[in-house]
């Protein structure tokens, strides 16, 4: 165990911070600290332009292998990149699903043709991705997917029918990866296919969901004979679940450190307000500030431990399994602390009729953190069953 | 940056765990805790002579193994896990750390040698009793002696861990005229010691009183403007060691509870198959995992501090985070264990109460969690403009 970075790493840190200082200016200056969770609907076109600017600097896919157009940066350098990006106030990335999920999944499971077709467009910031897993009847019970994919030999295409829901930023994306049943008689995790679906086509209808914030990050996606080319099935028909589970593994990678830097920015903002308005003199608020700081630091140590995973240490899987429950609960508490620090001012919206302030958005949006991507209750089931070996939940008969 | 155990560290963990599994089992813990002495002399002999655990983080130049605080915390974690009854904590986490941190002088060097070579037991006495913490709790006073080269010291010390079995004391006192903190080495012949029975029987406390004791200049460990900082860092290091013990407590409560609820059947099924139980167990695991991260990060920072590296400046913060989080995690897990065991968890026969009492005692030692959260809040509020 050792902390700290080498001189070479520190030089890399300088490169990153210099590039950000030179580029996060002019038209992009207003994007600083914007577009994070709960704020993803803001400045979308400008952030899409920023994604291309990032691409021109070669900063997309820095952890990908060189053979696939990445920089094969070490873990330390990826950590540094995320730290500096958040420190500079780098805006919420519109390409994070492609870079963090689609790319690594195609590198692990995709055909050479799929890799050649899709990876360069992610690295150039030209194509944006979203994730089509959840359905009205497949929420916590994700394997209960009902969407069906059928192959039409004469046309040489798959046609998908069904409905996806809670699809983040589908209305701004070009492509969506979709789980659908290739074997119509199958149930549960068997008989699924993992498809790459182009969204701009007649068979796809996207309807934004108005959330309790009054804004829309999430969507419903209706698939009515949505066409998917034969070579857009990743892996074999029927093997989609394995691909989807592999993808979930990428979600807990190095990007968690970038997420934590965003959290740090939010916490710092709350603390600044507490100092300005006198809340910082309230002993109960001080306890909560101390607790929030402590919680965020430990979140970082947890990630460092998971990322330094040593095969000899059997406890590492447990830290990774507890990550979602940990950060979502912490973030939800931060939203609540923000309101309590503001006091009665917390009630006043930015602009009528219902433009929320960023902290109001934080407070409200963090209520989704403990629901999406597996609710806190499902996370506890997973931990109890996979990490602690307790008996599985019994399934009802449908 | 590498935040995982290396092979040597894994070996230390396995060896310590295997040793304590046979040397500190439930019957042995109960035998030791029911005596006034509070530990089994043969176990002390083994840990200090054969295993030489006290040498772990003593520099090689001082006759130690020259390993780090991470290795030491691995030992404390295992001792916490097995509720090891031993004056090791008072001797190493409190006294040895004091001796290692004071500017090298002959007095400190010979005391370090006594611990290293003879396995002598030391205790640190500082608190005058009550709710105050650390420096604020020191009520003992000294004044420069008129008759000889040294100081004259008077004080009543409470909550002295393993004080009644120590052969030497490191005592803290404030200068009667200017408040200057001093740390002194006092042999047991110069103090009155009384064992004070405790709710947590696995760790013994004593009351120590000193009346007009003459301490020669050669027994002054530290008595200048640096002493205050040194003393605070001793407590920081002790907090990290205590947090490591509590990580062991949190882990053990989790694993024993999972075993129990997997076996125990009601309504024709293992009680561990009920979601109400599974979710509690998951919450226990999350706390144990976070506690592990907090302890070993703080242990790494302690190594940076002891090595004079810049990251050592984080010591207070890392110590408070580890102390507050791990003690709360251990108490949470012990309380959950008691509840999830059901009726038998409330009996003297099952070990759950031993962990539960130890966890509460640890929470209240070196400042409770509210104290440490406030300390963290102060640091953070200063840092952010």
Image: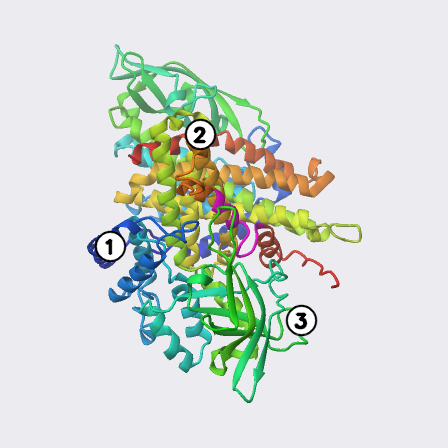
Considering depth in this image, is B244 or A12 the residue closer to the camera?
A: A12
Which quadrant is home to the N terminus of chain B? bottom left
Considering depth in this image, is B331 or A19 the residue closer to the camera?
A: A19
Magenta extent: A364-376
Question: Can residue A304 be seen from the camera position used here?
Answer: no
Q: Do dots 2 and 1 share one subunit? A: yes
Q: Could you say which disc has been placed on residue B116 in the image?
A: none
Q: Secondary structure at mark 3?
A: loop
Chain on which label 3 sits: A
Q: Is residue A45 magenta?
A: no
Quick one: label 2, few (<14), some, or many (20+) residues within 10 Å?
Answer: few
Mark sitting earlier along the chain (2/1): 1
Cα–Cα gap, marks 2 and 1: 35 Å
Q: According to the image, label 1 marks what residue?
A: A27
The residue that appears at 38% across and 78% down in the rendered structure is A117
Quick one: label 3, few (<14), some, or many (20+) residues within 10 Å?
Answer: some
Q: Could you say which disc has been placed on residue A187 in the image?
A: 3
Q: Position of residue B299 (x, y in %)?
A: 39, 45
Q: Is residue A370 magenta?
A: yes
Q: Position of residue B127 (x, y in %)?
A: 43, 22
């Amino acid at each position: 165990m050792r902390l700290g970075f080498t001189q070479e790493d520190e030089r890399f840190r300088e490169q990153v911070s210099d590039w950000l200082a030179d580029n996060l200016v002019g038209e992009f200056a207003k994007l600083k600290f914007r577009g994070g969770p709960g704020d993803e609907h803001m400045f979308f076109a400008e952030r899409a332009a920023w994604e291309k600017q990032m691409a021109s600097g070669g900063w997309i896919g820095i952890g990908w292998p060189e053979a696939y157009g990445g920089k094969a940066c070490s873990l330390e350098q990826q950590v540094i990149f995320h730290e500096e990006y958040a420190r500079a106030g780098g805006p919420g990335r519109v390409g994070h699903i492609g870079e963090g999920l689609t790319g690594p999944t195609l590198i692990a499971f995709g055909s050479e043709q799929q890799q050649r077709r899709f990876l360069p467009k992610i690295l150039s910031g030209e194509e944006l991705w979203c994730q089509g897993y959840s359905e009205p009847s497949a929420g916590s019970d994700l394997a209960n997917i009902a969407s069906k994919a059928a192959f039409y030999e004469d046309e040489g295409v798959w046609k998908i029918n069904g409905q996806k829901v809670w699809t983040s930023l589908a209305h701004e994306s070009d492509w969506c990866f979709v789980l659908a049943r290739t074997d119509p008689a199958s149930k549960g995790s068997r008989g699924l296919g993992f498809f790459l679906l182009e969204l701009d086509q007649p068979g796809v209808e996207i309807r934004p969901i108005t959330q309790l914030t009054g804004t829309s990050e999430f969507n419903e996606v209706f698939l009515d004979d949505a066409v998917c080319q034969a070579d857009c099935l990743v892996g074999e028909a029927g093997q989609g679940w394995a691909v989807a589970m592999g993808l979930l593994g990428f979600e807990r990678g190095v990007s968690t450190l970038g997420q934590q830097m965003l959290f740090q920015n939010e916490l710092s903002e709350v603390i600044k307000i507490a100092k300005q308005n006198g809340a910082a003199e309230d002993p109960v608020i001080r306890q909560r500030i101390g607790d929030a700081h402590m919680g965020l630091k430990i979140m970082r140590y947890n990630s460092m431990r998971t990322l330094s995973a040593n095969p000899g240490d059997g406890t590492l899987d447990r830290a990774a399994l507890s990550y979602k429950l940990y950060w979502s609960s912490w973030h939800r508490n931060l939203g609540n602390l923000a309101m309590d620090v503001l006091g009665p001012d917390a009630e006043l919206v930015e602009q009528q009729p219902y433009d929320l302030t960023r902290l109001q958005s934080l407070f409200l949006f963090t209520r989704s953190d403990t629901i999406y991507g597996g609710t806190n209750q499902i996370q506890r089931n997973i931990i109890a069953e996979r990490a602690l070996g307790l008996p599985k939940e019994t399934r009802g008969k449908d | 940056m590498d935040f995982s155990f290396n092979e040597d560290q894994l070996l230390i963990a396995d060896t310590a765990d295997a040793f304590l599994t046979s040397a500190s089992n439930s019957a042995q813990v109960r035998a030791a805790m029911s005596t006034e002495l509070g530990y089994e002399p043969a176990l002390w002999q083994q840990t200090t002579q054969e295993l030489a655990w006290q040498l772990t983080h003593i520099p090689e130049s001082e006759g130690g193994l020259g390993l780090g605080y991470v290795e030491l915390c691995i030992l404390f974690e295992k001792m916490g896990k097995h509720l090891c009854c031993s004056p090791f904590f008072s001797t190493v986490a409190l006294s040895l750390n004091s001796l290692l941190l004071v500017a090298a002088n002959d007095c400190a060097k010979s005391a370090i040698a006594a611990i290293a070579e003879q396995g002598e037991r030391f205790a640190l006495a500082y608190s005058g009793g009550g709710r105050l913490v650390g420096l604020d709790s020191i009520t003992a006073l000294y004044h420069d002696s008129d008759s000889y080269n040294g100081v004259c010291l008077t004080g009543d010390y409470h909550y002295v861990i393993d004080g009644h079995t120590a052969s030497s004391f490191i005592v803290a006192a404030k200068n009667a005229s200017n408040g200057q903190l001093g740390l002194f080495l006092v042999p047991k012949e110069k103090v009155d010691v009384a064992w004070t029975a405790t709710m947590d029987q696995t760790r013994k406390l004593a009351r120590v009183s000193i009346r007009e004791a003459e301490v020669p200049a050669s027994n002054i460990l530290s008595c200048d403007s640096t002493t205050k900082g040194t003393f605070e860092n001793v407590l920081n290091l002790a907090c990290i060691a205590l947090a490591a013990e509590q990580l062991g407590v949190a882990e053990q409560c989790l694993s024993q509870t999972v075993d129990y609820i997997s076996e125990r059947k009601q309504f024709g099924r293992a009680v561990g198959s009920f979601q109400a139980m599974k979710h509690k167990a998951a919450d226990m695991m999350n706390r144990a995992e976070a506690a592990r991260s907090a302890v070993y990060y703080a242990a790494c920072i302690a190594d940076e501090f002891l090595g004079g590296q810049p990251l050592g400046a984080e010591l207070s913060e890392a110590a408070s985070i580890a102390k507050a989080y791990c003690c709360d995690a251990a108490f949470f897990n012990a309380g959950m264990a008691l509840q999830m065991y059901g009726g038998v968890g409330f009996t003297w026969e099952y070990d759950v109460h031993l962990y539960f009492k130890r966890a509460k005692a640890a929470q209240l030692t070196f400042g409770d969690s509210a104290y440490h959260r406030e300390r963290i809040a102060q640091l953070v509020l200063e840092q952010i403009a």
